[in-house]
Amino acid sequence: MEKIYLDYASTSPMHPEVIQNMTEAFSEYVGNASSIHQFGQKSRGRLDRARRAISKSINAKPVEVVFTSGGTESDNMAIFQCARAHQNKGKHIITTAIEHPAVLRPLEKLESEGFKVTYLPVDSKGEVTTQQVEAAITSETILVTIMYGNNEIGSIMPIQSIGRMLNENYSHIIFHTDAVQAYGIESIDVKECHLDMLSVSAHKINGPKGVGCLYINENIHLPAMLVGGNQEMKKRAGTENLPAIIGFDKAVEITQRDQSDRKKRYTAWKIVLLEELKKANIDVRVNGTLDNKLAHILSIHLVGTAAEKLIIQLDLNGIAVSVGSACTAGSPEPSHVLQALHGQNGTAVHESLRISMGLNTKESDILYLAKKIIQLTKK
Amino acid sequence: MIYLDNSATTKMYPEVVETFATVANNFSGNPSSLHRLGEEASILMERSRIQIADLLGMSASEIVFTSGGTEGDNWVIKGTAIEKMPYGKHIITSTIEHPAVYQSMKQLETLGWEVSYVPVDENGIISVKLLEEALREDTVLVSVMAVNNEVGSIQPLKEIGKILENYPSIHFHVDAVQTLGKIPFNLNDYPRVDMAVFSAHKFHGPKGIGFVYIKKGRVLAPLLTGGGQENNLRSGTENLPAIVAMAKALRMSLDKLTDAPIQLEKQHKIIMGFLDNQSTVDVFSSSKGAPHIICFGISGIKGEVVVHALEKKGIYISTTSACSSKKQLNSSTLYAMNIPKRKAESAVRISMDVENTSAEIDQLVDSLQETIVKFKDIR
Ligand SMILES: Cc1ncc(COP(=O)(O)O)c(C=O)c1O
Ligand SMILES: Cc1ncc(COP(=O)(O)O)c(C=O)c1O
């Protein structure tokens, strides 16, 4: 049976070159990057090189990139530490209704501690507008955290425009974006977007799990969340995970190889899939719209089809897709993103599939998926 | 090359590297995904959890995976503080804890918690009597390390446990990062311990992975929140290749340790015997300490100078712990042991591993001899 993986937004397989580089690093870089002997110094040099490459990819300075254990830690650190360090200036935070749980759960925690959080609703495209953000700002607002691209429906937020507005009129407000899904697909420039913080996770771009980074603008004050040793410019303690950082570095290099080509490919395949389904008279609707989307993510509403049953059947046919995000840890709770888009009781909430593409995806995979959806929904 | 900096970090066993690569190549699913690839990943992860639990006499449900020792310590300390806030805000620890513990305490102090630091004797062993006197009605946590990372002193966990039997609601946390693969260590010998923190890169596993033991019935507020992985205790996409590699490293390390205590103790005796006979050497470790760590100084010579002198001879040791060796600060453990600053500045640490041969130890002793003689002239 064919095995077709179309769940890249959940996690992506490590690229063979990444595995190769890490495997070599395990024996090549023995020293602790904080040790003063030559092995330590060799590790330190390699660590700095990775930091330079990754910071360059978002137009940040090396000192502005702090390595973490992944997207969740980056988001938690950005939100908790910013809120706690700046609460003397106010206790209001603005976000959207469709953020990842790694952003929403910390915000809920802060609410229980007395912070006020505005959850901006999204429009039918799954986006918020700059005007919405501006209208929500109060004299108490200290942080705006809005994802770059959504992990379930792929909608892209107007980050550059929001950044410009904040920078022009509210430069004291800290601006964070969760770019875990967008990084590697979209070209991101933290300076152009006037971003103060940005979260990235390596395993979404064919890098290793357990590593990511948080960009922190050098002009903002963000104390460490994990404290201990003096690693990571005192912003994140813990023995540096150099082999994983080397793998991350490689993954970043790989994403840059054919970024625009990949975008075109994925976008074209979305249309192929929708056309195939429509040709077979399947009532299919895109959650959100097709344009201005993260190229690798497509969420479709198959009207009248129970999604959960369908993904099990697709799975039996060797195709891995998902209902919402994997990150709700296996719990098939209704997606808060689809609810934000269609209302709590919208039928789409239980009739939608997320298809997400990646490096190894081929057009034939998409055609096979279309064929199987047609067969299974017609039964 | 003779690597004697194993308390900073160890070299991954080739078999462990192989395991990592195999899992990275063949199990690309997200354990939280509902499809088969996710399920395969999840089964493998749970198998590793059971393997670790079996090796250490715990039950699998008592093990939570983290990104390493620093996260583990931060989590247990702050998670206890938050969870037990209604019952009190007093914590007891020692004066010789790793920065991951010490800095977490400092952070809590700024937030209104009160911390008692119980002193140690000249051998770096905590005073059980003073610890008992420090206990209060509102004490919620006692945090004492198992083996000190700078001088190797072994802490009296049994005695502390006995005292705490009269205080059943206090969390007893042990930073056990320097134990596994170094000395025989089984939590069943310390039934009163509630939480213990471990880090894989100290026992020939990968960096960026570790685990926390949480005794059944004990509750910790999570530190990283989001997708709800690890039973809602630690969010973030599970680092499967590193988890499986860690389980493998643990099994191998424990296997190799079976005969090693005798060998390590023999080597420890040889080095200690040699150092004790040098008129210009101060030995800071006690002969009753853990056999893998020896801390000493050539009087009047800065530790860094000695590290570099031995490095020229192909021998890699360190100035106390890697995490603090970047600071110009004296070793905090030595400071706590009342060693004068001038002497503490000379401190270096040899940290052995079961893989070190007697020939290597002989060569170390020869090189130390030459170095000591050389510096006698310089002084
Ligand atoms: C948008 C978004 N943010 C954060 C995360 C969390 O990242 P990680 O799994 O690396 O902790 C994910 C993925 O799970 C995500 O898609
Ligand atoms: C006693 C002790 N605790 C905690 C740590 C921190 O562990 P990690 O480097 O995995 O964060 C270390 C090592 O650096 C240690 O020796």
Image: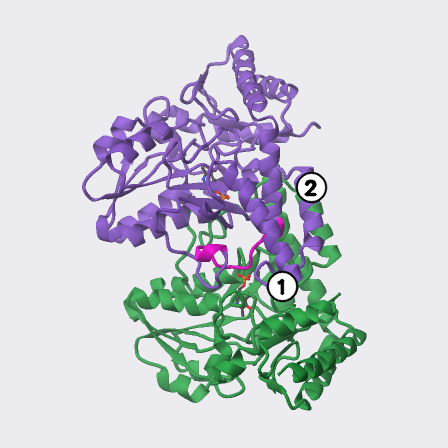
Foreground tag (1 vs 2): 1
**Going 31% across and 54% down the picture, which residue do you hit?**
A85
Q: Is residue A233 magenta?
A: yes
A247 sits left or right of B357 in the view: left
Q: Residue furthest right?
A: B359
Q: Which residues are magenta?
A: A232-243
Q: Residue at the spot x=58%, y=21% of the render?
A: A261
Q: Is disc 1's CB within 8 Å of ligand 2?
A: yes
Q: Residues within 10 Å of mark 2 (few under 14, many from 20)?
A: some
**In which quadrant of the rendered view does residue B41 lie?**
top right
Q: What residue sits right under mark 1 in the picture?
A: B9
Crowd tier of the residue under label 1, counting other residues whose Cα lies within 10 Å: few below 14, some 14–19, many 20 or above: many
- State the residue at coordinates (54%, 67%): B325
Quadrant holding the C terminus of chain A: top right
Q: CA distance from mark 1 to mark 2?
A: 26 Å
**Closest to the observer: A229 or A365?**
A229
Point out which mark residue B25 bears: 2
